[in-house]
Image (spheres, rainbow, N blue to C red):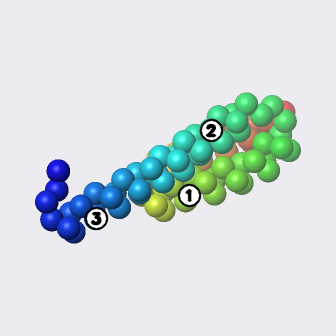
């Protein structure tokens, strides 16, 4: 365990950040799962905007890498576009 005041504070802060990052990451993963389950093109398009925004926020916060965010959005966009074409 840390002995310095500043180190103890840093431990508290990093624990808070970790919990916050875990919450946002899990929420986004659930939203992605729900988007993949949608079988209607119109509702999928609307939901895609929300999910893309969530993914961008994760990348901005550094929870996920920006390239992973781009890959996720690309794969989801392909699925949504396929639903709209059908």
In three-dimensional space, the C-alpha distance between marks 3 and 1, rounded to whole angstroms, equals 29 Å
Question: Is residue 3 depicted above or below 45 in this figure?
Answer: below
Within the image, what quadrant is residue 83 found in?
A: top right
Name the residue: 63% across, 57% down: 53
Q: Nearer the viewer, mark 2 or mark 3?
A: 3
* Of the image marks 3 and 1, the number of the one nearer the N terminus: 3
Give the camera-side residue of 78 and 39. Answer: 39
Name the residue: 62% across, 38% down: 30
Q: Which mark is residue 9?
A: 3
Mark 2–mark 1 contact, CB under 8 Å? no
Residue of label 2: 30
Give the camera-side residue of 85 and 35. Answer: 35
Name the residue: 17% across, 50% down: 1
Residue of label 1: 56
* Crowd tier of the residue under label 1, counting other residues whose Cα lies within 10 Å: few below 14, some 14–19, many 20 or above: some
Q: Is residue 27 left or right of 18 when viewed as pictured?
A: right
* Crowd tier of the residue under label 3, counting other residues whose Cα lies within 10 Å: few below 14, some 14–19, many 20 or above: few
Question: Is residue 38 depicted above or below 10 in this figure?
Answer: above
């Amino acid at each position: 365990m840390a002995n310095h005041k500043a180190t103890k504070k840093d431990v508290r802060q990093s624990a808070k950040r970790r919990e916050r990052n875990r919450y946002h990451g899990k929420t986004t993963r659930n939203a992605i799962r729900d988007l993949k389950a949608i079988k209607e093109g119109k509702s999928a398009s609307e939901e895609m905007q929300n999910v893309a925004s969530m993914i961008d926020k994760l990348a901005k916060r550094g929870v996920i890498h920006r390239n992973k965010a781009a890959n996720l959005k690309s794969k989801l966009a392909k699925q949504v576009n396929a639903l709209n074409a059908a």
